[in-house]
C-alpha cells in the first residue's frame, strides 16, 4: 500500500469516489430489463433487484456501493482465473497447443473447435473452459482435488476463504447435458485425459464458487497489478500470465458481444450468467458490477450500462488517445560548464524516445551533462534501459555524465557507477 501522507488536519474531507459510484448506481437502478438465467434453475430464483458496484485500485483501496456483501456465483467469471492457474502450472506453449486464443464469435455454450488443430477456440467459452479445467494438475488427479485446488487459488486472489454454493452446483448439474456433451467430445479429441464426467463436474463446481462484488474487484485488481494481490501483496499470478489472460478477455470475454463491448467500453472484461461482470483496467483498477438480469447474449443488463458510463465519465477506455500534456524534457539549462537536463513524467518507451531524440539534437558547449530525474515519477524496464543507453553514448562523445536521481527511480545505481556514471546526491542549483 502507498504510504499515507501524515497530515495534521483531521477534519472530515471525504474522497468523492464513493459518491461517483453511488450516482452510477442510482442512475441505472431503473434500467431493470432482461431476464435471469433460467437454464440453471437456482439462478432463475435470484433476486432481480440486487445491484452492486465495486472498484479496487492496484494500491489496494476498495470502494463499493449497493449490495456489496451479497454473494453470487462466479460462473463464467471463473474462467479467466482458472486459465491463469493452468498457465501458471503448464506455461503458455503447452496451453496454446491445447486451447486457442481466437474469438469464436459465438454464444458461450457453442461447441467451437478449430478444425485443423482440434482445439477449442478460446478459454472464455464453455468448451475452452472445460478443457482448461481438465488440464489442471495431473491427468489422474481426482476431480475433488482439482476443485479444491481452484477454490483455494480463487481464495488467494480474493484474499479470503471462498466457498462453493452447493445449491447452485447441484442445480446446474441437473441441467448440464450440453456441458457434459462437450466434455465427452473434448476427451474424444484427446484434449485432456481425465474422465470426462468428473472434469465437467469440476468445471461446474468452479463456476459455483461464491464471491461478493468487493471480492470480484479485488480479484480483478490482482490481474491488473501484474498478478500481485493488492491487499496481501502476494504474487499469485506471474505478470506474463496476467497479460495473456487479459488479452484473451479483450477478444472473447463478452462472448459474441466482445467487439461491441471493447469499442464501447474499452475495458478487458468477463461476464457470468449469475449477473456479474468483472472488468480489469491494466495497471489501474479491478471492477465488479452485479445485477442478475441478463440480455440475450447472457450479459448483465445493468452491468453493461454501468460499465459504459464508468468508462465514459471516468475516462477508463484503454484505447483513449487523449494525449497527456507534458513533455519528457522539462528544461535544459547551461550553468558554467554544465548542461543540466531536467526530465519529467513517466519513463517508458515513447518518453525515452523523445528524450533520446532531444539529446541527439542538443548542442554541447560544455564538459559535463547532468541528467536531473527529480521530476520523473516512475520508469519501466525499457525506459531505464534506453536512458542508460543514451547516457553511455554521451560518454562516448567525451562528456562527463552525472545523474541526479534522489528517489532512485532508475534503480541502477550500482551498474551506473560501474559504468562511470556519476551519482549526484544533492539537488543541483
Ligand atoms: N456454469 C455456466 C455454464 O456452463 C457458466 C456460463 C456463463 O456464465 N456464461 O453454462
Image: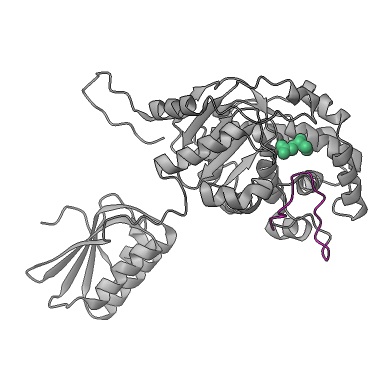
With 185 as the anchor, is 291 left or right in this view? left
The C terminus is located in which quarter? Answer: bottom left
Q: Residue furthest left?
A: 336
Ligand 1, what quadrant?
top right
Q: In the picture shown, does residue 290 fall above or below 256?
A: above
Q: Residue furthest bottom?
A: 397
Residue appearing at x 24%, y 19% in the figure: 10
With 196 as the anchor, is 291 left or right in this view? left
Residue closer to the observer: 186 or 151:
186
Q: In the picture shown, does residue 372 fall above or below 111?
A: below
Residue appearing at x 32%, y 31% in the figure: 4
- Residue 257: x and y, percent? 64, 48
| Image: magenta residue range | 102-117
Q: In the picture shown, does residue 118 fall above or below 80?
A: below
- Residue 29: x and y, percent? 52, 25
- Residue 385: x and y, percent? 40, 65
Amino acid at each position: 500500500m502507498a504510504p499515507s501522507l501524515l497530515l495534521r488536519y483531521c477534519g472530515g474531507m471525504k474522497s468523492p469516489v464513493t459518491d461517483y459510484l453511488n450516482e452510477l448506481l442510482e442512475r441505472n437502478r431503473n434500467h431493470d430489463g432482461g431476464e435471469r438465467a433460467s437454464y440453471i434453475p437456482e439462478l432463475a430464483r435470484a433476486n432481480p433487484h440486487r445491484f452492486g458496484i465495486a472498484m479496487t485500485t492496484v494500491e489496494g483501496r476498495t470502494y463499493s456501493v449497493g449490495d456489496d456483501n451479497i454473494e453470487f456465483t462466479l460462473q463464467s467469471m471463473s474462467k479467466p482465473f482458472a486459465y491463469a492457474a493452468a498457465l501458471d502450472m503448464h506455461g503458455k506453449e503447452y496451453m496454446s497447443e491445447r486451447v486457442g486464443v481466437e474469438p469464436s464469435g459465438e454464444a458461450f455454450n457453442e461447441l467451437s473447435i478449430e478444425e485443423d488443430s482440434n482445439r477449442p477456440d478460446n478459454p472464455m467459452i464453455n468448451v475452452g473452459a472445460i478443457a482448461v479445467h481438465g488440464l489442471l494438475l495431473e491427468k489422474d488427479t481426482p476431480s475433488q482435488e482439482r476443485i479444491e485446488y481452484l477454490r483455494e487459488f480463487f481464495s488467494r486472489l480474493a484474499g479470503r476463504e471462498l466457498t462453493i454454493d452447493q445449491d447452485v452446483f447441484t442445480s446446474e448439474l441437473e441441467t448440464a447435458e450440453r456441458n457434459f456433451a462437450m466434455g465427452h467430445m473434448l476427451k474424444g479429441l484427446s484434449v485432456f485425459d481425465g474422465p470426462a464426467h468428473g472434469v465437467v463436474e469440476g468445471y461446474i463446481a468452479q463456476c459455483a464458487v461464491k464471491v461478493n462484488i468487493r471480492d470480484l474487484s479485488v480479484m480483478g485488481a490482482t490481474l491488473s497489478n501484474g498478478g500481485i494481490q493488492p491487499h496481501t501483496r502476494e504474487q499469485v499470478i506471474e505478470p506474463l500470465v496476467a497479460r495473456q489472460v487479459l488479452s484473451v478477455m479483450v477478444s472473447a470475454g463478452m462472448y459474441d458481444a466482445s467487439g461491441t463491448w471493447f469499442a464501447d467500453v474499452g475495458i478487458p472484461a468477463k461476464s457470468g450468467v449469475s449477473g456479474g461482470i468483472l472488468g480489469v483496467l491494466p495497471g489501474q483498477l479491478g471492477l465488479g458490477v452485479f445485477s442478475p438480469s441478463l440480455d440475450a447474449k447472457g450479459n448483465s443488463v445493468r452491468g453493461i450500462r454501468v460499465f459504459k458510463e464508468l468508462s465514459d465519465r471516468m475516462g477508463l477506455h484503454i484505447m483513449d488517445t487523449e494525449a497527456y500534456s507534458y513533455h519528457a524534457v522539462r528544461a535544459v539549462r547551461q550553468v558554467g560548464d554544465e548542461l543540466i537536463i531536467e526530465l519529467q513524467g513517466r519513463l517508458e518507451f515513447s518518453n525515452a524516445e523523445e528524450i533520446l531524440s532531444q539529446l541527439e539534437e542538443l548542442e554541447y558547449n560544455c564538459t559535463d551533462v547532468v541528467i536531473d530525474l527529480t521530476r520523473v515519477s516512475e520508469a519501466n524496464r525499457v525506459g531505464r534501459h534506453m536512458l542508460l543507453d543514451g547516457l553511455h553514448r554521451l560518454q562516448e562523445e567525451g562528456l562527463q555524465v552525472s545523474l541526479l536521481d534522489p528517489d532512485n527511480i532508475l534503480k541502477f545505481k550500482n551498474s551506473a557507477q560501474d559504468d562511470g556514471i556519476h551519482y549526484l546526491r544533492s539537488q543541483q542549483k
